[in-house]
Amino acid sequence: MSAPSKPIAELTLRSILLGGLITLLFTAANVYLGLKVGLTFATSIPAAVISMAILRHFSGSSILENNIVQTIASAAGTLAAIIFVLPGLVIIGWWQGFPFHLTAGITALGGVLGVMFSVPLRRALVVESDLPYPEGRAAAEVLEVGAGSREGAAESAAGLRLLVSSGIASAGFAILTQMRLAVAEAGTWFRVGSGATGIAGGLSFALFGVGHLVGLSVGLAQLVGLITAWFILLPLLTAARPMPGEVEAWAGTVFSQDVRFFGAGVIGVAAVWTLVRIARPVIGGIASALAASRARHAGEVLALEEQDLPIGVVAGVSLALLLPIAWLLWSVASTGPIAGSAAVLVAGALVFVVVIGLMIATVTGYMAGLIGASNSPVSGIGILSILAASLLLVGLFGRDLPPDTTAALVAYALIVTGLVFGIATIANDNLQDLKTGQLVGATPWKQQVALVIGVIFGSIVVPPVLDLLNTAFGFAGAPGAGPNALAAPQAGLISSLAKGVLGGDLNWSMLRWGALAGLGFVALDEALGKAGRMRLPPLAVGIAIYLPMAVILPVVLGALIGAAYDRWADRTADPERARRMGTLTATGMIVGESLWGVGFAGIVAATGSDAPLAIVGEGFAPVALIGGTALFAGLIGWLYRGTRRAVTSMPAA
């Protein structure tokens, strides 16, 4: 009789520690990137590559252990999205910084509740669904390649080298911009007939890498949004609102007060359309799959790869989490001008979090399966959530309130939305991870525990990083924000919507026009899809209308260059491997600049100077523009040539 086989390592201490370390680094990078540009990057694949490159030196490592590492680290790509909401509390002046316990509590409670809410959806949306889960399948393929052969180990090592080299190049160039030896951003404003507009671009490896990762379809959609905002809307609106003074102040005011709300209208319609389109298949798929599951597994012992966290544990944890959520909300509502209504506010918020949270967990899980966690319009969910929360508060309290009461209600709506947003982001990520686990034979409950651990790790690092960036740079629109303030686009929009709904001064006119345009962009996208052409996601169009050109243009350029690289990759002997190498190079660009951005924020905070590394004056700017542009282009070419050499030098699969 043969001895029983040794269990395969899966949820181990070293996988937790390594996953936690990667989570801390990638969460910090994503917080900075999200506040700068309004986008975050997926961390599952780079985390899997790093894990395989490190754990292969330890005995007994396995594909399942590497899967746990990427599951924990994937929280960095999603939990950091809480910065799309919470900086709004600073922007409206309610917070001056980010209190650790309150910020970490909102982040952790919403995130863990998101894990719990998505557990019952695994069988319906992962096991018994034909949803593609593009990122989940890609991560599984990376893990299988790395575990399957010596060539897989070589690919992991080569991928890690590409990640590190592009990260160093990205951080190095960012340092040159802080020294003022290269220009990070340049633009000019000018008149167009009786109106005005501008042209601006940025030399940012992080934004360029984002463009590569989002792909050509999203990149072209953002180009459409850029053209709409800057060469159609802005000239027309400035011509209709002539102002004295400099062109920059005139056009800039119109852009921030009108064009951005037009973009918000497009974003809102795009988000609603996504929800409407998928509502029926979500409800029908869950109902039929759960019915089939009960019939098939009645009395049957489930295999390890079918074992979720027990439903009793899920229900118990979910109910238990409502107690600290209620305490957190009470601590906010029981002081100040809304203290008299604290009990009603807390009770209503708990119902809102549970009901809306369950709906959103289902919707975002489905969207992750349909288009991937990175492309899922979670920020649109946040917009709809803040509108719903604000309108409910208007129904309870009305609009003719003292300013301090209105401000307190806006802050309360943002905190409730933060909890719902945590549910949305983690549910979006959890099902993607569970698809990867299904493909590699992982134990679902261990992955679900791992993601809870990732949420806790991420919740610890989010508050201090937010505090550091707020101290060093501030956020656009916040009291006392300086010239280097981070854009925080979603947080600014969400706080503006809450203030506008509760205060009654929302720019409804531009929102309505944007909503009408959003219907047009939705119709265009659907027509392109039916014709079999490349689609133009309307949410990407709306984001490009909302954000400044200097942010969008590098993303568009990255998408175009990335598409050219992918076309080359498709002609290689192993296209998928070549594409993965390109993905790792682009990810390194993002991570390098973003981590340096967090480090630079520390230098700014310590010195009290907004340019502590500058070694030349403003007179060097023309040289910095020309030289910096040439160096940027040269480094991009060098990195992609290195990636191609790495691909062609690897042994055939």
Image (spheres, rainbow, N blue to C red):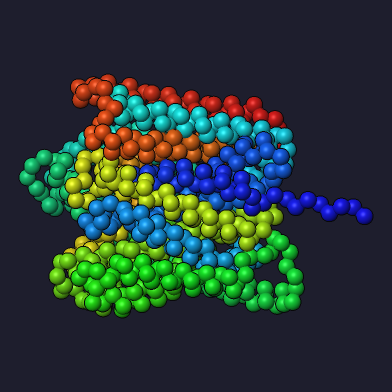
Q: Nearer the viewer, residue 606 or 473?
A: 606
Residue at position x 48%, y 51% in the image = 457
Quadrant for the N terminus, please.
Answer: bottom right
Image quadrant assignment for residue 193: top left
In front: 370, or 610?
610
Could you tell me if residue 514 is visible in this image? no
Q: Is residue 521 left or right of residue 238?
A: right
The answer to whether any part of residue 463 appears in the image is yes
Q: Position of residue 359 (x, y in %)?
A: 46, 70
Quadrant holding the C terminus:
top right
Which residue sits furthest left?
244
Identify the residue at image location x=64%, y=40%: 55
Q: Is residue 64 above or below residue 173?
A: below
- Classify 445 as above or below 3: below
Spot occupied by residue 307 in the image (x, y as percentages of width and height): 67, 65
Q: Is residue 325 above or below residue 606?
A: below
Task: Give residue 473's position: percent from left, percent from top.
Answer: 27, 42
* Residue plotted at (24% across, 24% down): 621
Name which residue lies at 36% across and 31% down.
174
Residue 96 location, x and y as percent? Answer: 24, 53
Height in image: 180 above or below 52?
above
